[in-house]
Amino acid sequence: MRFRPGPQRRSTGRAISVWVIALLVALVATVQIRSQAEVERSLVGIDTTSLAFLIDDLHRANDSLQAEAADLQARQATLRSGTSGAADQVLNDEANRLRAIEGLVPVHGPGVVIVIDATGLTALDLQDALNNLAAGGAEATSVNDHRVVTGVSIEQTTAGVVIDGSVVPPPWTITSIGDANRLAEVANLMTQALTADRRVREATYRTESDVVIRSVVSSRPFVYAVAS
Amino acid sequence: MYRRQLFSIGAVAAVALLMGFLVAGQVKAQLLTPSNQVARYHALVRSVQDLEATNAESRRLIAALRSEIDALESDAAGRSAATQALQNQVADLRAHAGLTAMHGPGVAIDLANGVPGPDIGAQASYLVNFQDVQDIVNLLFAQGAEGVAVNGRRITPLTAYSGSAGEVVIDQGPPLSSPITVVAVGDRNRMVAALYDASALPDIRARQVQFQLRLTFVGSPDVALPAYDSSLQIPHLHAI
């Protein structure tokens, strides 16, 4: 004998299926609304042009990070080889590289030389110019033979712009070493903008295959900071 | 009875139809429709998110490699006095380059977006921008800061700031947006005094008045800075 469900059982089954579907609808609706809200929240104020620039910047940044990772992997392999003098070689190379980065030794390489003759430019103007060059890949920079790295103070005083305690009057000769093509693009935009500034008498630049920066930053021991 | 059955079938059909629309909407939000500007915009956003994920992964790898290299160098230094002396020199250089985590007395500065003003020409002025961060970091270094980090990104001798309105990109890191926290280790009294100076940070102060841009700071006996986790490549630079 076969069991046949009665009308009461059938209607209970139907009610359960309606409730399950309603639950699923609520779930999907929640996911949809939340994902829309998430996208909207993360994108407030970003237009497509800015996004395109951001993508370009992130591509360049990721390439640079991958190059750094490859360099570190090579160093790690050398150290792991355990050959005599391998660690000394790695440490010597690292010390020389860091001295160049920190501005502690004279350096040379391809780059640009920018000359700005102006009256009334301030420390903020100079900091902006130096940051533009750094963003354009400058690896070393000097202003009127004063080596500048992040951390070197550039201040506005009544006597004018002071770099690391020395007054640096215009005209400013800014020398930067790095990818000469990228730096030339930055220098071109900068000199165009500066030429339009009424305070600026002249702003020019030239690219050079080998620029020399002899000025150095003096090393300062930490007084407050402790390595973690 | 027949009417009740019809009604319940209709209800199930209506719910199923609604669910179909919602599922279709969800799928559509995930896919690129070339003719649809919104979808293209979302595709750009997904590219940014993918690139940011790669960026974070690369920075994790770099931090791990630096840590392993440090351990291998320490092993080697344990076997030779000359290597030990070299390692000490490199440790000092790394600390000054921002490659080592540090702590000490200092200040923590919070900077946050203000409110939009009525002037259309100054639309983005209420947002924190990269020049604001650059100005604060430069002020801190001018007052003797020995190390600075912005939202956990350590500043190095080669640091560059960029970004569009409301976004701050530091070196090879992902874009940061308000609120921004700048932390510096150094002479905290000197740094706090400089931050109180009404003539310092003129652009930020003007926008504090005009757009209620928020700048707050506090001195602390001990703040911590992470190590730099990105690239310090100098392919064009040669020591003389």
Image: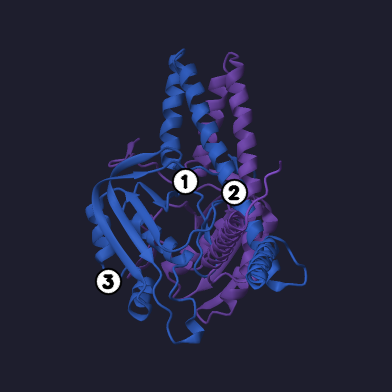
Chain colours: A purple, B blue
Chain bearing tag 1 is A
Q: Amino acid at mark 2?
A: Ala
Q: Disc 1 vs disc 2: which is toward the camera?
A: 2
- Residue depicted at x 57% and y 69%: A46
Marks 1/2 same chain:
no
**Residue that badge 2 annotates:** B53
Residue situated in front as seen by the camera: A38 or A180 = A38
Q: Which mark is residue A216?
A: 1
Going by the image, does B194 lie left or right of A67?
left
Q: Which mark is residue B198?
A: 3
- Residue A180 is situated, as x and y percent measured from the top left of the image, at 68, 55
Helix, strand or loop at mark 1: loop
Circle 3 Cα neighbour tier, 10 Å, few/some/many (<14 / 14–19 / ≥20):
few
Q: Residues within 10 Å of mark 2 (few under 14, many from 20)?
A: few
Query: Quick one: label 1, few (<14), some, or many (20+) residues within 10 Å?
Result: many
Q: Residue at x 49, y 80 (%)?
A: B123
| Mark in front: 2 vs 3 | 2
Secondary structure category for the residue under label 2: helix
Residue at position x 28%, y 63% from top? B195
Would you place residue B17 above or below residue B234 in this image? below
Position in image of residue B24 (x %, y %) = 70, 64
Image position of B224 (left or right of B21): left
C-alpha span from label 1 to label 2: 38 Å
Callout 2: chain: B
- Are circles 2 and 3 on residues that touch, CB within 8 Å? no
